[in-house]
Amino acid sequence: MSIVCLDLQGVSLPRRGAALAAAAAAALALLLVACGPGGSPPPPAAPPPAEVGVVIVKPGALGLTSELPGRTEASRVAQVRARVAGILQKRLFREGSEVKAGQALFAIDDAPYRAALASAQATQSRAEANLAQAQALAERYKPLVAANAISQQEFVNAVSAQKTAEADVAVAKAAVQTARLNVDYAAVTAPISGRIGRALVTEGALVGQGEATQLAVVQQIDPLYVNFTQPAAEVLRLRAAIASGALKGSGDQAAVSVVMEDGSLYPLRGKLLFSELTVDASSDQITLRAELPNPKGALLPGLFVRVRLEQAQAPAAILLPQQAVARGNGGDSVMVVGADGKAAPRPVKLGAAQAGQWVVLGGLQAGEQVMVDGFQKLRGSAPVKAVPWKPAGPAPAAVLTGAAASSAASAPAPAASR
């Protein structure tokens, strides 16, 4: 559509009333404004710069956390076994309950061992009587041999008989102690405090005949161990960065958090105990162990968990939303909006991801503006308008009725920005 510009000098309008004259004058005035110098239309106005969401770079100290797979393990495990042979008479605990060290768990028929103890005690009494007689004889012979009233040989025989009697008493005492131990072993007790499992034998079973029969298992699960693995290459990179001063090591104070299989975070934090000195040749992994408090027994041995381990601290790290970083074969980069409003790519050095964000270890300066969304609005070197980026939250629920609900259901979903 073209605009025709007219030279209205000397043209007179017919007089058809004041209202018609005013309307015609207004229309002619619009036509005159639309005409530029020399009778040509003005150039179209430039569109406003597109708005893009940005975040301001704010470096700060940050603990570098790795999330590694692991399994829980009881800190102490003890097998309860029969140390003497006999018929199992009673089970004295509730399966799956907590037991204390020294608590009675099983009762084995101890009648044969009590009889053996009585016999050993009688033998000890007889040996002690013989010792008393031998001692008296040796004491009586001592002045006689000095007066040459008896031969030296008789005195030597009396002293030898005394020492033999003393040895017999010692043997008898050891036999009594052994018999008493067998009586005590007939009452099977818990070797450690912890949670006991099911009974592996029932009343009436013959146990300990030829072997130490396993009766139950007690596990201590407070504290609980968590065994997990980490790639050897990652460990070497961390150690090299700490040695160069780029990162600060956490050492033995490395904090450990546990993520359950359903994604929930265990509320209590643990501590790193040690790492293996060798690398597993089959998996190229290093095994580490952490200790985790478990006062309520919420964690059980054998659970699969994810371990978040803080092994180092970056003194000037930056957190960026993951959608702000472009990753490719040529490296990682972000779009930085300069003071002139133009966006330009910038290579960056990334660490591990934490809580849905990338840890940037190099490539950015404090105060710079990094684009997070609006990438589809970029048009070559055209300037953009940087506005603070706000994370998208869940949309509020709305009740739609009638035609509004039908149109909302049929509307296409918006395309992702990047």
Image (cartoon, helix red, strand yellow):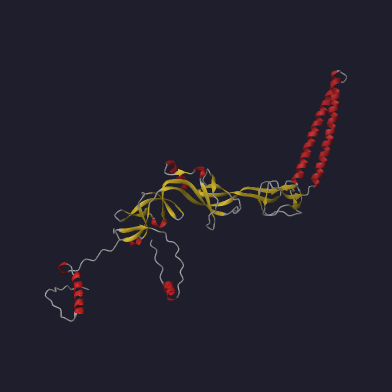
Most extreme residue toward the right is 149
The x and y percentages for residue 317 are 41, 48
Most extreme residue toward the top is 147
79 and 106: which is toward the camera? 106
96 and 163: which is toward the camera? 96
Note whether 138 is above or below 48 in the view shown. Answer: above
The residue at 83%/41% (across/down) is 119
The quarter of the picture where the C terminus appears is: bottom left
417 and 8: which is toward the camera? 8
Note whether 50 is above or below 181 in the view shown. Answer: below
Query: Position of 186 compared to 246: left or right?
Result: right
The x and y percentages for residue 1 are 22, 73
The residue at 83%/33% (across/down) is 128
214 and 20: which is toward the camera? 20
The residue at 85%/27% (across/down) is 136
Note whether 260 is above or below 83 in the view shown. Answer: below
Most extreme residue toward the front is 18
The x and y percentages for residue 76 are 62, 47
**How many marks are shown on the rendered structure?**
0
Query: Position of 186 compared to 224: left or right?
Result: right
The x and y percentages for residue 196 are 67, 52
Is residue 281 at least partly visible in the picture? no
Q: Quadrant of residue 179?
A: top right
Is residue 313 at least partly visible in the picture? yes
Query: Position of 80 compared to 270: left or right?
Result: right
Most extreme residue toward the left is 10
